[in-house]
Image (cartoon, rainbow, N blue to C red):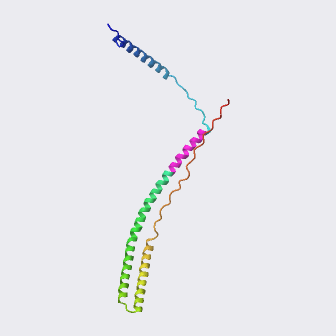
């Protein structure tokens, strides 16, 4: 009969050895977990203290930057709405001004075409200038009644990011 490495007797011995080894470590683990260990904390070095202060300063800087950006975004949105309403109110004023200028120009062109003397041409030109001045003053009064145009908010000044502490330099080994 041939001998093989993987016969049933060898497999049975390997399984038994594995079971014995597995229970032995379980018993050992239970014994070590019952002991209590006390950890001694070393006092913080100057670098560790500076690093902790730096971390706190960075967190405060980030929080300040986020709140400033949120306020700026809200101010930009309110400015955009106010600017749009201001421009929407100016649109009919500008349209009325253009219509008055076009009417004055039409009257001037007709008067110049009908005028045969220099006095009539001068009177047409003077009437046109008076109509333009009246339309301009009417437009300026309407724009002044709207009030001042909204002013865009200024970008927030965030400040300088904190600088990290420098690591201490190790002393050279004496040879």
* View extreme (front): residue: 2
* View extreme (left): residue: 1
Q: Is residue 148 above or below residue 50?
A: below
Q: Is residue 19 magenta?
A: no
- The residue lying at 43 percent from left, 61 percent from top is 78
- The residue lying at 35 percent from left, 82 percent from top is 106
Q: Is residue 125 above or below residue 139?
A: below
Query: What secondary structure is the magenta-colored segment mainly?
Result: helix
State which region is magenta. Answer: 47-64
Q: Nearer the viewer, residue 135 or 115?
A: 115
- The residue lying at 40 percent from left, 66 percent from top is 85
Q: Is residue 117 above or below residue 14?
A: below
Q: Nearer the viewer, residue 124 or 89?
A: 124
Q: Nearer the viewer, residue 46 or 17?
A: 17
Q: Where's residue 13, x and y in %?
A: 38, 12
Quadrant including the C terminus = top right
Relative to 101, is 169 on the left or the right?
right
Q: Where's residue 107, x and y in %?
A: 36, 84
Q: Quadrant of residue 97?
A: bottom left
Q: Where's residue 91, x and y in %?
A: 38, 71
Number of numbered markers: 0
Q: Where's residue 1, x and y in %?
A: 32, 7
Q: Nearer the viewer, residue 133 or 23?
A: 133
* View extreme (right): residue: 174
């Amino acid at each position: 009969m041939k001998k093989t490495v993987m016969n049933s007797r060898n497999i049975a011995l390997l399984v038994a050895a594995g079971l014995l080894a597995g229970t032995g470590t379980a018993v050992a683990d239970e014994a070590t977990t019952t002991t209590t260990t006390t950890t001694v904390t070393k006092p913080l070095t100057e670098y560790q203290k500076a690093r902790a202060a730096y971390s706190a300063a960075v967190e405060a800087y980030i929080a300040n930057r986020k709140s400033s950006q949120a306020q700026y975004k809200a101010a930009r949105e309110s400015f955009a709405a106010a600017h749009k309403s201001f421009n929407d109110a100016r649109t009919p004023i500008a349209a009325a001004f253009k219509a008055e200028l076009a009417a004055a120009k039409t009257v001037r062109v007709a008067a110049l075409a009908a005028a045969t003397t220099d006095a009539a041409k001068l009177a047409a030109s003077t009437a046109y200038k008076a109509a333009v001045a009246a339309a301009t003053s009417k437009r300026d009064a309407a724009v002044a009644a709207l009030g001042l145009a909204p002013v865009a908010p200024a970008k927030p000044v965030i400040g300088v990011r904190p600088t990290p502490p420098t690591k201490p330099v190790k002393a050279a080994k004496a040879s």
